[in-house]
Amino acid sequence: MALQVYGIPNCGTCKKAMAWLERHGIVYDFIDTKTAPPDREMIEDWVTALGSKPMRNTSGLSYRALGEAKKTWSDTQWIDAFAQDAMLLKRPLFVKDGTAVLVGFRAAEAVLQATLAE
């Protein structure tokens, strides 16, 4: 099984998630979305799996800069926005065997274990 964690290295939530994975012996590959942003096709697959709403990094400057129109955007518009600016993506984003399974890192321990463990 291949687990990939998408995020940025200096993100506190990403650091917590990676520490949790390491404590639980879960092998993963970290992909820095600043230096290797995901392509539109990958993002489209992620939105299909998780929906665009949970994937929005609503606390970031990029999100706030979008203005009021973002409140009425379709998934397609969000996919385009995510593809243009990976900082709009909530972090970390977990992809297991090619499928997005979780975004963010606030789930209960049992959910994390069931979702991310092999």
Image (cartoon, grey):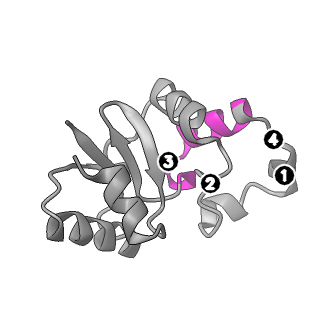
The quarter of the rendered structure image containing the N terminus is top left
Displayed quadrant of residue 23: bottom left
Label 2 vs label 1: CA separation? Answer: 11 Å
Q: Which residue is mark 1?
A: 71
Q: Amino acid at mark 4?
A: Trp
Question: Would you say residue 6 is visible in this rendering?
Answer: no
Q: Earlier in the sequence, mark 4 or mark 2?
A: 2
Label 4 vs label 3: CA separation? Answer: 17 Å
Q: Which residues are magenta?
A: 76-89
**In the image: residue 79, left or right of residue 35:** right
Q: Which residue is mark 3?
A: 86
Label 4 vs label 2: CA separation? Answer: 12 Å
Q: Amino acid at mark 2?
A: Arg
Q: Which residue is mark 2?
A: 56
Point out which mark residue 73 bears: 4
- Label 4: element kind: loop
Decide: is 68 above or below 109: above
